[in-house]
Amino acid sequence: MDRRQQKTREAIFKAFSRLLEKKSYNHITVQEIINEANIGRSTFYAHFETKDDLLNAICRQIFGHIFSNVLNAEEHHDFSKENNTLTDKLTHLLYHLKEQKKDIIIVLSGESSDLFLQYFKTYLRQLFEDYESPSFSEIPKDFVLNHYVSSFAEAVKWWAGSGMEIPPEKVVEYYMALTK
């Protein structure tokens, strides 16, 4: 993606974020996003097929690099030297959510919550699949994986609902204590 395309995507993301502050996800139209971003209709559709596709792209932007094999130090946190344990990855993920706190709280408190959580759980599933969990020979692995993903997603929803005041490390510590 060239710089012009990156600037356009960023304008669309920011416009969407501003609109989410004013109205619920279901009441935002593509035309409103286009107007707020000050772009043409064809420009929007060159980047996204639908408003849901835009939300998915925002999720990819927030979560994508966490799954990268190469992590760089970031402005508010540095997980580049960590051991890449499940705890490290979950904590890193929460830092990214906290950096997008305003948008995440809005998205999780409105009608877009279910769609956001669906995308979020897809990323969480990848994350939990990469790590060995205690063996539950009598329980199907997919059932255990679903439990981990769903319970962490609900923990994040709770954390966002409480204003994300608890540090990410503490939230992950609580979660890991419950999964032992």
Image (cartoon, grey):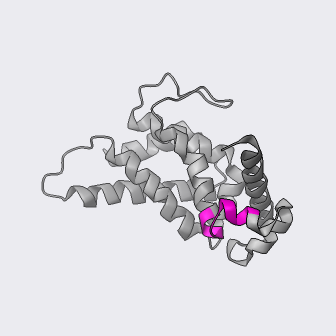
**Residue that appears at 74% across and 41% down:** 3
Could you tell me residue 169's position as x and y percent?
A: 52, 36
Q: Quadrant of the C terminus?
A: top left
Going by the picture, which residue comes out furthest to the bottom?
Answer: 27
Q: Position of residue 86 (x, y in %)?
A: 39, 38
Numbered range of the magenta stretch: 43-53
Residue 116: x %, y % from top left: 56, 63
Q: Specify whether 132 is left or right of 108.
A: left
Question: Is residue 8 at all visible to an observer of this figure?
Answer: yes
Q: Name the residue located 38 percent from the left edge and 43 percent from the top edge.
A: 177
Residue shown at 61%/68% (left/top)?
A: 52
Whether residue 52 appears in magenta in the rendering, the answer is: yes
Figure quadrant of the N terminus? top right
Query: Residue 166, can we see it?
Result: no
Residue at 33 percent of width and 60 percent of height: 146
Residue 99 is left or right of residue 158, and the answer is right
The spot of residue 170 in percent (x, y) is: 52, 39
Q: Residue furthest left?
A: 138
Name which quarter of the figure residue 73 lies in.
top right
Q: Quadrant of residue 31?
A: bottom right
Closest to the observer, 159 or 140: 140
Magenta residues, dominant SS class: helix
Q: Nearer the viewer, residue 12 or 152?
A: 12
